Amino acid sequence: MMNSPTQTAKRIRINSSFIWLGFVQAITALGIWAAASGGQIFRAFALGSITLSMITALVVSLEAGLTAMILFEPFRGILRRLQYLIVPYSSNEPIHLITPIVTFLAFALLLSRHKLEIFRHTPLATATSILAAICFLQIFNPLQGGLSVGLVGALYYLVPMAWFYFGQAANRDFVPRMLRFIVVLAIVTSLYGVYQLVFGYPSFEQVWLANTDNYGSIWVYNIQRALATFSNSEEWGRYIQIGCLIAAGLGFSRNEGNKRVLWFGAAAALIALLTLTGQRTSFFGLILGLAILFLTGARDSRGVATRVMLMFAPFVLIFALVNPLTDDDGYESDGNFGAMMTHTSKGLVDPASEGSLHARLETWTKLVTETLPSNPIGTGLGTGTLAAARVSPNNDTVIDNHFFSLALSAGVPAALLLFWILLRALVFCFRGWRASDPDSEQADLWRIMLALTATFLLNNFFGTSFTIYTVAPIGWLIIGWVSKNTSSDRISN
């Protein structure tokens, strides 16, 4: 006797429920055993569970997998440090492989669906694909100290670049939704940074600080910078900067209605939090992005002129009335908060006097006049990473410029190509904003993208944003979205 379709569907649902119930029971039992075993076994179970959860989200949809990775990345740093409650410190951590593994699977899934078309599907796809090919070949450059060093470089350069293809393949509404999600994450993660400044680092983080060999810049005067949940304070500062610009852009949007007050409140809170990171480059990026958002809100050239005068008036007053700050100003009496705010203010008010700026200029001058002319085709993708520094003491120079770092590791043509990609993305954002109806949600979105892309250019010149765990994927995702939505027919719609 044949079963009806209704009975068959009901039986399938029952069988599926039993399968899921058995799976949950097995995972629970395994988790109890791992917790009882402790140490490396429990860590392996925890990291495996995180990886499995992200892969499961990816099976549901590309957007779900990307959301899982975006949620995980801001907490990667604190999750790594929490491990030292159960395992000894190690400089090589498997937690850093979780996102690359899921990213590789997502890229393989994308490639199986769209074939080679993804490498030339949008205006910036071909240039990005050429850049990725150059970086891939540089993995095998013997000048960097070995293949393992090159593979480490791939984690910093190639893995984030895969997010460009995600940006051009994801649903059109995905990136705008993620922008709002990033604002929430920036506020939530920053609360822990305030805790660190007030109460200091917990014991498990002290273990990491006592052993890490790559974070001398954590000291400001004689206090330690806060990291929040991130791997370092630079990452925290860049993430706050991105979240603040998104919140401010949404606050300027009339389409947000009554929610504009909440977005402006979030932006104000993130500005205050950014001063506590001590990251002056992030603050300059924020100023540039806010200026772009403010100016693009003008209706005509007269409005632009008025806004320019309003924008520069506070800076004129600051430079005219504020005395230059010394390293001791505000530190002794104000403690941790005062020290970080003094450090930030000193760099903003008188950046030319900063020793770090002079050191950067000296390093860059040497690169341009000596190092790069001697080898313009690159010394290997891992050059400049901690892995390369451990192989050769000559590889530990801090460049703090992503374009120069890329020129050194992958060659001058690769650095010029990256600069061209970012510059073209900036032009596309400007065109998208100009072509959109001034009062439309599309125009507001293009304003935010314009501000973010401009800060990516600045922060990559005075920093290494496109090698930062949380920031680089977001940057490439946005560039991919811009490339996808830049054609005239999409802009007009």
Image (spheres, rainbow, N blue to C red):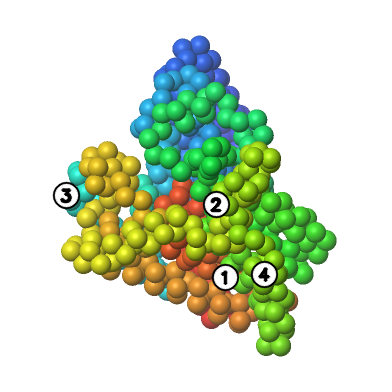
Helix, strand or loop under label 2:
loop
Q: Which callout, 2 or 3, points to the residue nearer the camera? A: 2
Q: Which residue is mark 2?
A: 279
Sequence-first tag of 1 and 2: 2
Is residue 392 left or right of 72 when viewed as pictured? left
The residue closer to the viewer here, 208 or 43, is: 208
Spatial CA distance of label 1 from label 2 is 22 Å
Tell me what residue is drawn at x 44 percent, y 59 percent. 357
Around disc 3, counting alpha carbons within 10 Å, would you say few (fewer than 14), some (14 to 19), or many (20 or more)? few
x, y percent for residue 174: 59, 58
Q: Which residue is mark 3?
A: 142
Callout 4 amino acid: Ala
Q: Which mark is residue 320?
A: 4
Callout 2 amino acid: Gln
Do labels 4 and 1 touch, CB within 8 Å? no
Around disc 2, counting alpha carbons within 10 Å, would you say few (fewer than 14), some (14 to 19), or many (20 or more)? many
Q: Which residue is mark 1?
A: 450
